[in-house]
Amino acid sequence: MKVPVNWLKEYVDFDLSVEKLADKLTLSGSEVDQILGSADFKNIVVGEILEIKKHPDADKLHVCQIDVGETKPRQIICGSLFIVEPGNKVPVALAPTKVGDLKVDKAKLRGVESFGMICSDEELGIGGGGLTFFDKKTKNGTNINDIFGRDAVLDIDLTPNRTDCFSMVGMARETAATLETKLKIVEPRPAKVSSDKKIKVLVKEKNLCPHYIAKIIEDVKIAPSPEWVQRRLLAAGVRPINNIVDVTNYVMLEWGQPLHAFDADKITGDEIIVRKAKKGERMETLDGVMRTFEDRDLLIADSVGPIAVAGVMGGAASEVSSSTKNIVLESANFEAVSIRKTAQRLALRSESSTRFEKGLPSRLQEIAIERAAELILDLAGGKVGSNVENTTRKDEVKTIKMDVQKFERFSGIQISDKQAVSILSSLGFECKKEANLITAKVPWWRLDISIPQDLYEEVARIYGYNNMPSTLPGGELPTPEGDPKLEMISKIKEVLIGAGFSEVINYSFTSKKVVDFLGENDKALKITNPISPEWEYMRTDLSGSLLGNIQTNQDNYNKIRLFEIGNIYIKNRNLSSERTLLGIILNSKKEDSFLLLKGIFDLLSNKLNIKLDLEEATVGLMETGRSAHIITQRGQNIGWIGEVNIKTKGFFGIKDNAAMIQVDINLLRKEYGRIKIYKPFPKFPASERDLTFVVADVVKVLDIEQVIDSMPSKIRTKREVIDIYRGKGLGTGKKAVTVRFTYQSEERTLEEKEIDQDQKDVIKKIETKLGGKVRGGKAD
Amino acid sequence: MKVEEIKKQFEKDLVHASSNQEVEAIRVAYLGRKSKVTDILKNIAKLSVDEKKTVGAEANKLKLEIDSALTEKLNQISAKSTKKPIDISEPGTKYPVGHMHPLTQFIQKSIDVFKSIGFEVYQSPEVDTAYYNFDTLNVPKDHPARDSFDTFYIEDGRDISDDNKLLLRTHTTNSDVRYMETHKPPVRIIIPGKCYRHDTLDASHEATFYQMDGLVIGEGICITDLLGTLRYFAQEIFGKDVKTRARPHFYPFTEPSIDLDISCVLCKGKGCPVCKRSGWLEVMPCGMVHPNVLKKMGVDPEKYSGYAFGFGIERLMMLYYGINDIRLGYSSDLRFLEQF
């Protein structure tokens, strides 16, 4: 909503700077987004164009000689964005100066010197969007501050609940309450009826049009509006057309009620019909576009066909033109949602539709039609007919009780009854006070007020939130519940980041292509209204995201180590089930990607204090024989690890080898939280022995471990594979596996003999079970 | 052996020691558990009272002398160290460096602030029903926010007006009534999480964003509590010089509704392109929970009151780290991530 400050002053007295006014209004709820036309222009003056020539070396540039009130004209180069001709007076920035953020200096453009710049409205930040031409009587060299400075316009972002503020009168009420000054609003009196001409009104859709007033005015004289009307309309962002159309717009800006004027002689029949469109019905709107309607759209029609899209835009055929003599004035109330839907569908948001979309009180139609009649009589003359009214809805008279003590408890501030009453009264509430209770009658224009909390807000906002102190919530504290899942997630992030992995957050959206590749078509939730065909589905897995991330980074980085903890979404009949997964991915130019990642898996299970096993398995996108399921001690499968297979690498365009882990966080969390218990140090020393077994390559480490574990010993406390060697000296198809054994007793220092005996037993068992040969011997 | 003899023998031995190891061996031999000095002290009980006095004192004195001689010897040896100096400007051994996503870092920072004043973290589904996302929050059925221009819907065979219609939550406020179905006041929670709005992407608009909501319900919770909490948060995050400004606003689920602005952290309130020259940044929508929403929560609005707030993490994170393109957060580009 654009509020010209000078216009505002017609309704309310105040004397403070525009900036102060803007601040105060912002803090009481009418947020001033920007102040237009009040900028302090330095060295920007009125200049008269004396001569224009084409630039000798640039087709799109012109060289102008401009009289800027100096002894000699200035040479200034301009583009061809605006058409200017000698005699025009335009805003000219004199170099060196600044226009907004733009520095204007003396410059040479293609060899020709320029000593300034012609400034568009946009460059000056004054709205309008073209080039301002000053009156030819304006003196050259006049600082444009003297012209614009006095006509500041507040551009206000209104909240959708405050329909009443979409008008000068509404903003005047707010201003008066905010500044605690007097309001000078006069409601118009009914115009004197001087004609008995009437038009019938038939409202077929009473729900969509609860109130319709039509009035004929005969013998009007169409002419341009006087300068003060045009100036105000322009300042508020509305283009002046002729006195009749301008009055309808003026009254809309003043009171917030959109009006429409039809050329009465272009209406066929003696009746205005408010009805729904027939599907496919067509009409040309005022903007010259042929519109086709749906059966939900509300139309204003005569006996032949549509003459306006209700609340949105008039029809071209019944437009008021220079030849119009008689008019029908419409002041109506239309149902908000219907107007919004039609305006949206036709992509035709107008000043009118934005006001209807928010809902209007019925009283407003009566005021607006009388105000319009009064102004038309003034500006265009004519004979006024009486109102033809069709109404099914009266404004509700609401009274709300406000308990001042409750307000104090609710707000945290102390306020006297008198102060509360004074604030409410300044906003138009009629207040009665009994003991602590204020009974407030809600003014007809405040459709947004219906409960005591609404009154609390009125008092609090005018009192000023910034005048309120800071406190913290008191009283009883909630019992903390804790969240092991979040705690575990933090721990995982800490461990992975410490190990050199970086966290990514990916979009939850994915494409049909990826969903098809993963074979998860039945599981993926489909979005009805995606913003891109690449984002038609919700992801069912982290692998699509993380594999894509390798592709994103592989041209810039050789070593990529990433992880994500994020949600996936699974279709469950027609519901959704959401799971949080951990995905870890890395790449490698070598064949070691699986073991690199398995190391991270071991690290995580150690730091989380969760014992997890791997179980060879086939995993969708992974190499067969290089992938496994991750199994808890309770035997539950909670995820997988594997080396990405060639087909998957091809699909995602991944160059190097890659391996990935995916784990269900919710399942992992069931294992989390085991507290580590301190064990005292052993009293007696431990002995370590390393044995290297040369076995066939097909023999697995797990086989060796199982053989060792099958012979329990009281003194052998640990065994760990510490090295695997393949190559020289072993022969093909062989490997050397080094196992470190730890021996220790809690009761005594062990003797060499006992250890030797166990080592012998182990060696024998491995030789017989796995055919391995031992190399090397004692370690200490 | 007599104390005096031990001392002579010790001095002889020490002269020949030339390494740390040799000095250590001498220490074991003379002061260890099975050493000569220890022997004397162990056998002291067998002596007469007079002898005890003299021998005990001498032995203890010797022990101290040996100890300080050994220490001095060690110092001499290390002073003669043969290690050559190294070029300390050579690069150190490289260790892998991982990076936490700036969104996570900012969320964690925020959680820490709220935890310090008694809040707990709660989480709710991203794919939710119209009931929790809109209906329970006093958003009318015909509200523009429900349009498919604003909200992503899931193909689930339901009509858009159905309470159970599936959608991508547009705010983490969808937690509020869900949480209250299983909890009673007093309540203090924050709800960080991913949200979605139907928006065209550019440097300052995303269809995916993180929001942090807060909900406090209890007896006597008031507007100044709300203001105090958010002012505290702003100063904890952006420093004590940051100013705040509360403006009346409108949201369906709160009454009154407020927008809390902070002074622009880039220009310190002087006015710059980021704050559109106003000196203020609009960052924290909030308000007192609407009585209709309290009723949906099963909370008696006559007895309890509450406040709620919800702010976009990206906006604050971008200001905090000077990030100029909101889409970078979801780019997974290491050139971005490794800066944090």
Image (spheres, coloured by chain):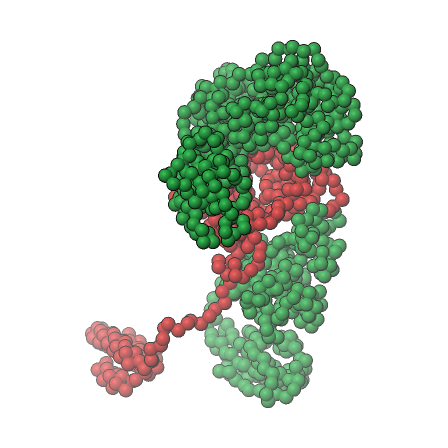
Would residue B97 appear left or right of A509 to someone viewing this image? left
Q: Position of residue B328 (x, y in %)?
A: 55, 55
Would residue A31 appear left or right of A766 to someone viewing this image? left
- Taking the spot 72% from the left edge, 61% from the top edge, the residue there is A517
In the foreground, B337 or B226: B337
Q: Position of residue A669 (x, y in %)?
A: 60, 56
Report which colour depicts chain B.
Answer: red
- Taking the spot 67% from the left edge, 16% from the top edge, the residue there is A218
Q: Position of residue B312 (x, y in %)?
A: 54, 45
In the foreground, A145 or A19: A145
- When the figure is inspected, residue B215 is found, relative to residue A744, above or below; the finding is above
Q: Which chain is green?
A: A
Give the quarter of the image for residue A289.
Answer: top right
- When the figure is inspected, residue B13 is found, relative to residue A22, above or below; the finding is below
- When the figure is inspected, residue A444 is found, relative to residue A33, above or below; the finding is above
- Taking the spot 61% from the left edge, 75% from the top edge, the residue there is A591
Could one spot residue A423 in this view of the protein? no
Q: Position of residue A641 (x, y in %)?
A: 64, 66
- When the figure is inspected, residue A80 is found, relative to residue A420, above or below; the finding is below
- Taking the spot 75% from the left edge, 35% from the top edge, the residue there is A292
